[in-house]
Amino acid sequence: MCRYRHTHPRCPQTLCMDDQLHKTPLLLVAGLGGSPILPEHPLQKSGEPLLVPDQGIQAPIAKDLHARFRAKSSNLKVYEHLAPRASRRKLNHLININFIDKSFKLPPQKTGSNTQYPNGSQFSPLSPRNPGSDLYPNGLISTLWLQKYLHLVPGTVVSFYALSQDSSEDPKLIDDLNALKLQLDKYGIKLVVAVIADETHSERISNLRRATGLAQRTGLLYVPTNSSTLEKETFVESVCLLAYGQALEFYTSVSRHIRKKRTNVHPNQYHSAEDSTETPPLPSAGWEVRYLYKLAVMCEFRQDLSGALRSYEETYEALLELCEAFSPSGELASKHWAETFSLLDQVSFNMWKMCIYLEQPNLAYRKFQLHLSAVDSLARRKGVYEAESQVHIEWLASQHSKLAQLIDYTQGTVMGVDSPYVADSEDFDSPVRLPRSGYLRLQAARLLKDISESPETNEKVVAELRQAIADYQLSDKHSRAVAGASLQLASVTNDDVASAKYLKEALKVYRKDNWVKLEAQCLNKLLQLPKSVLSLDERLDYYVGLRSLDKSSVSFEVEDVIELPSEGVQVSGTSCPIIAEATFESPQIHISLPAKIQVTLIPKGEWTLDSLVIDVEGNPEFKIQHDPNHSELEVTDKANLHLVKPQTIQLTYHPDQLGVVRIKTIQGSISFGKATYDFSVPIKVTRNVVPWRTPNSSSTHYKRISNPLEAEVFPRPARIKLSTVQSIANAFAGEKLSIDLSVDNQEDEDIDMKLDCRVSTGEGKDLTPTWKDAKGRSIIQKPGQATYPLTIEVPHSGASALSIEFTAVYVLSSDSVEVKDALSLSVPVIKPFRVNFDVSPRPHPDPWPSMFVPPEDLESLTPIILKRWCLSAQMLFLGEGTVELLSTSLDVSADEDSEIKLVEESDLTNKLVGHNESLNFKYLFDTTRKGLKDVRTVAAEARLRVQWKRKDADACEILNEFKVPLVRLNLPHHEPRVMLDYEWIKDDDSADYVKLLYYVENCTAHILNYSVSMGSSAVWAFRGPKSGTLRALPFSRRQLEYVLFPLADSPQLKLPQLRVHDVHYKRTLSILPASEGLNTDKGELYIVRK
């Protein structure tokens, strides 16, 4: 806690820590426990104790409030990240909270010229006019003044009190509060009192406010002891907001007082004869600097960063003007130079920080450069130091280090971790750009290295370089900068182990980026280190690496840098004396068939390898030993590995598993005495165009291979051919599909083959095929062709297509590798036939029993009658080719109250039908009731089955059955009806004519009366009753006969309409055709002329 005291103006420790801290408003909190931060501060020796409570409140709520206030505090730091937000009023408060007790003292006050302090001082202890001050008689500013506002004098004091249960103690509390308020009023400090009490004491709280004059919201606050967490947090936040606002007012008041003194006070106004000294007092320019500096500090306390920057700039200019008036001679002048230059450094540092706060880092760097130039020019003109002196260079290094430290404090907010090493001014609009802190550290290290090689300077250089490395290691993009700093560290450090460590770090980067000269420099320095620092593995590795880079740069033999062992030792390293190019002959190879691989070895210098190991996936390693007499391209286990120029070797690879195979690694070894050095050979990948050397020739041609290190292993190509003898266009529902699989063995020897067939429908249902001769067992087939038949049961329904996949897996007698071939068929499934049904009535040949003369064994009241029906079917063949119908059958069933009997059916045995050909057939059946119960309608179901086979198939083996979907019939049984039958009659003497037979059936128990009339016709002449009345008894059948003579030659003639009308029920019966030659169309009947 001292004033600036430096032996030389260019000392690197120019600023005290408090001068660099951000000016954060201070808040003192008493009554919650804690002790002052600076108990031994010089300003407090003659100060007065603060009249706050003796000790902290013991209530549990006090500890909670203490912790919450501490969480709200922004501790003092050089760079405050929250300052820009506070400056833009985007932050509620930014405040430094210190906890105090009664031992805390306020610094003494200043008085006017005609009054004195009790301790006898006429002026402030920090004034240059005070003979007891370190600044007397012409000092500029003291760090104690900054510490006064940073740690001792707040804008607000918050004092906590616990309200006693005894109200008789309230007068004493009121006296204490009034005394504290009066004491703080002299300093312009606001008092906020917080009383912790129960909710029942609200009236006493009001009395306290009236007696002390403290306002309810800003003076005396009430904190209930049972406050919730939210209420306590809200209270602490509101106190911080209140204190922050009062602090801004306090610093504004201090600034106003400083401006007033700057305007009204003459610098020598208070100097008397007794105060006179040989040293002249501080001139007006010095007082101007003091006031400007204080105004800048108050702006920073108010978080007015723009105003602070302007004030610091004015202070800096005033300091330069002050320096122009100084004389460089004398011890006291040197002291003035030291103080002034220190303040210049301090003000400049604050300007850099303000620029960074205001998001103007380039301006900060520009001011940094101007500061270096201004101070250097001033010091040269005044003759403070000689050009390029040690003092000057140390000062330059310290300035670079300070700016770098300030950038580090920003924690990446000013520039990202990926920012460039140092910006090129041509790439930016601004002529200068703030560099990384690592760059500034490197500049500081460079400056310090130019001074001397003393141990103290080396330590500073090492520290700067380490911090530069730490900055650049924040991102992977600055590996070269890290390597450069590490290389410098290795050259300045006096520790061989540390030097080796830094050289290894640099070597790693230079190898990765292929910086050959720098890599060689690192390797040379590593090999020149004492042999005890590096192991045998490392030394051999670095020796091989150095020889591989440039043999001419190796001025020593291996024995000079390595102690070779007397016994066999095997070591490994990362340096590689050769690189390789490798490729498969083709990107597609087949299992068990030989594949060629060529490897080209490209040496870095002249090397002789002991061995080479090539690892190809899925194959034992190729181990090749050195043989100087071998000269062939194709190698197995020996090759000439004396490498002077690129050399190609060819290997034969036999893949034994499917997938993608790769050339994985290539390992080499070299002998150095009895030490064997193993290394991994990097494989250089040349894509798209790959060289391939022709065996027994010096020519090279090129192959187009996208990835020469990989090849895909396919199954060995099959030399059998799968096919079907038949051409299968489609399959029929319900068919036993016969397929003959033909296997043509084109191999040169017998094969042991296994056949398999998988069949599934288009809906995913699996079917099981049936092999005639073999399935699931091995078949020995000689070269040539063989046929293997099988059948597939096609479902009657639910299959839209068949997916048939034949698989043949075989092995040769000379090779155990399985070879596969497959044949896939997709066969649509269709219905073989389309059947259309038609049901029409037929007159029954037998008469019906009379209702009036019933049989003796009949128990029913109504007779049992038979009705005949004809089921006609037209069947169309939909498939390709020709099929043979073997038989048809119709199953007709009725409900439980009815009975059906099949009378006649068509014979379609051995009928051939081709594509889109149709066959007609019919079935006659009678319906009747089964028991005594009368049946009005017979519900019947007809099922048609057709047995068929393909024309050339064996009926004994391949018999197919087609089931027509169920046909449901509703046949009226007790309904009156009129049927028409006809007969063409040919007469040799006259023309053909037609006999029409109308059958009128009354199937009811009623007597029905019909009015019958025959309509006229222009194409017929008829003979028969024109009109009349017909009475039909119950359960009787009447017949009407007409003879018609055609009057036209049309192939289809319209018949005259017979109208049968029920007189009683007012219903006209429809005429139903009962013969195949009759057609109906829109209610009219037509007859086909024969």
Image: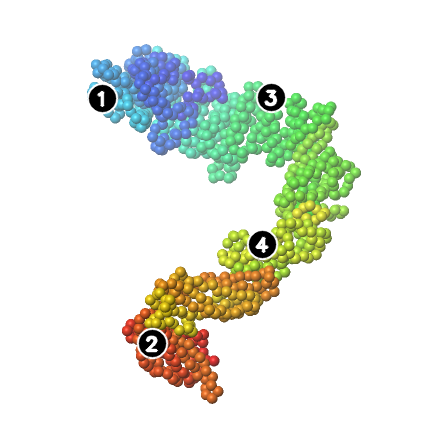
Rendered position, 475 above or below 917: above
- The mark nearer the N terminus, 2 or 3, is 3
Q: x, y percentage for residue 710?
A: 63, 44
What amino acid is found at the position of numbered circle 4 in the picture?
Pro
Which residue is labeled 4 in the image?
769
Residue 76: quadrant of the picture: top left
Q: x, y percentage for residue 40?
A: 39, 14
Which residue is labeled 3 in the image?
495
What amino acid is found at the position of numbered circle 2 in the picture?
Val
Crowd rating for badge 4 (residues with CA inside 10 Å; few <14, some 14–19, many 20+): many
Q: Which residue lies furthest to the right in this view?
A: 629
Distance between the Cα atoms at labels 1 and 4?
A: 98 Å
State the residue in front, 913 or 536.
913
Which residue is labeled 1 in the image?
200
Crowd rating for badge 1 (residues with CA inside 10 Å; few <14, some 14–19, many 20+): few
Which residue is labeled 2 in the image?
1060
Nearer the camera: disc 3 or disc 4: 4
User: In what element is the residue under mark 2?
Assistant: strand
Nearer the camera: disc 4 or disc 2: 2
Q: Residue at x 36, y 26 (%)?
A: 72
Q: In this view, does 1 lie to the left or right of 51?
A: right
Q: Residue 995 carries which label?
A: none
- The mark nearer the N terminus, 1 or 4, is 1
- The mark nearer the N terminus, 2 or 1, is 1
- The mark nearer the N terminus, 4 or 2, is 4
Quadrant of the snapshot with the N terminus:
top left
Contact, mark 4 vs mark 2 (Cβ under 8 Å) = no
Q: Which residue is drawn at 72% across and 26% down?
A: 568
